[in-house]
Image (tube, rainbow, N blue to C red):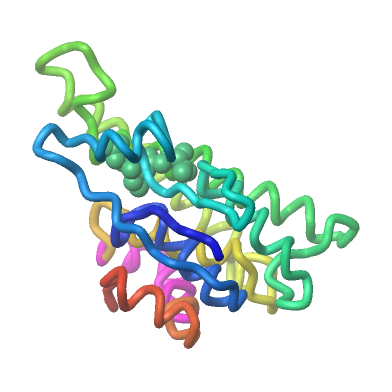
């Protein structure tokens, strides 16, 4: 049994959808924030001392953090589900490249957008951080749209774990309707991913919106 620690519509949403897609047994643990904005002392002491979600407890009791690592790990565990190119597959390099681009570029830019005050020591600096993050998100989503092009999925015809992660970060845009108008291919991709029955089950719980 896997335990996914998360909160609706956060970085746990892609992992939850992937667990559904793979048919792995899991339970969800909601990590509520206290009045100080921090998770419980139990979560900090036993699951993730840094605080954020998601975290994933594996059947052997060990804990993983880092959403992209969970995506790569879980998809590889069930090769028969075909949600990741195998290490020797020609698409493996692009798969890892784009997964890390989403996790290391778009996700942190989004954190700067939504938690701007954390990224400056200047009491008046948050609005500048937010403005820069917003411009960076535009630039990164332009790049994502170029990588997607007119393909149904990021790797081409085949859906993969990458598409879950990409649709999740798209849902975090400063304005999703503006993003989807600017990049209709990202809008179509989001709809395609969200329409998958297993993902739809997980994302209904996350209240992932239709646009
Ligand atoms: N690099 C981490 C980032 C995790 C992260 O920043 N999670 C956010 C939610 S999307 C969070 O828990 N933020 C709460 C906080 O920092 O207070 C990952 O990919 O798992």
Q: Is residue 141 magenta?
A: no
- Closer to us: 114 or 53: 53
Using the rendered view, name the quadrant where residue 75 is placed.
bottom right
Viewport quadrant of the C terminus:
bottom left
Specify start and end residues of the magenta stretch as a single range.
Answer: 177-192
Is residue 145 found left or right of 120 in the rendered image? Answer: right
Q: Residue at x 68, y 47 (%)?
A: 97
Q: Is residue 183 magenta?
A: yes
Can residue 78 be seen by looking at this rendering?
A: yes
Up/down of 83 relative to 47, above or below = below
- Closer to us: 21 or 26: 26
Using the rendered view, name the quadrant where residue 206 is placed.
bottom left
Is residue 9 found left or right of 151 in the rendered image? Answer: left
- Closer to us: 185 or 6: 6
For ligand 1, the image quadrant comes to top left
Viewport quadrant of the N terminus:
bottom right
Q: Residue at x 82, y 62 (%)?
A: 86
Residue 150 locus on image (x, y percent): 59, 73
Q: Residue furthest toward the top? A: 122
Residue 42 locus on image (x, y percent): 32, 38
Residue 193 locus on image (x, y percent): 49, 76
Q: Residue at x 46, y 47 (%)?
A: 55
Residue 203 locus on image (x, y percent): 37, 74
Q: Main secondary structure of the magenta part?
A: helix
Up/down of 115 relative to 175, above or below = above
Can residue 135 be seen by looking at this rendering?
A: no
């Amino acid at each position: 049994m896997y335990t996914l620690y998360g909160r609706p519509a956060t970085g746990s949403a892609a992992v939850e959808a992937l667990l559904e897609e793979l048919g792995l047994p899991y339970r969800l643990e909601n990590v509520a924030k206290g009045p100080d904005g921090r998770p419980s002392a139990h979560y900090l002491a036993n699951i993730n001392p840094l605080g954020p979600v998601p975290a994933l407890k594996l059947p052997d009791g060990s804990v993983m953090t880092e959403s992209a690592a969970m995506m790569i790990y879980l998809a590889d565990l069930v090769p028969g589900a075909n949600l990741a190119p195998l290490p020797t597959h020609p698409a493996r390099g692009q798969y890892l490249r784009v997964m890390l681009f989403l996790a290391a570029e778009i996700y942190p830019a989004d954190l700067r957008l939504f938690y701007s005050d954390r990224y400056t020591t200047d009491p008046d600096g948050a609005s500048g951080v937010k403005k820069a993050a917003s411009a960076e998100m535009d630039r990164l989503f332009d790049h994502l749209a170029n990588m997607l092009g007119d393909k149904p999925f990021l790797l081409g015809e085949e859906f993969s774990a990458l598409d879950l992660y990409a649709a999740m970060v798209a849902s975090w845009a400063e304005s999703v309707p503006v993003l989807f108008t600017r990049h209709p291919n990202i809008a179509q991709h989001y709809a395609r991913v969200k329409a998958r029955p297993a993902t739809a089950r997980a994302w209904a719980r996350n209240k992932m919106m239709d646009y």
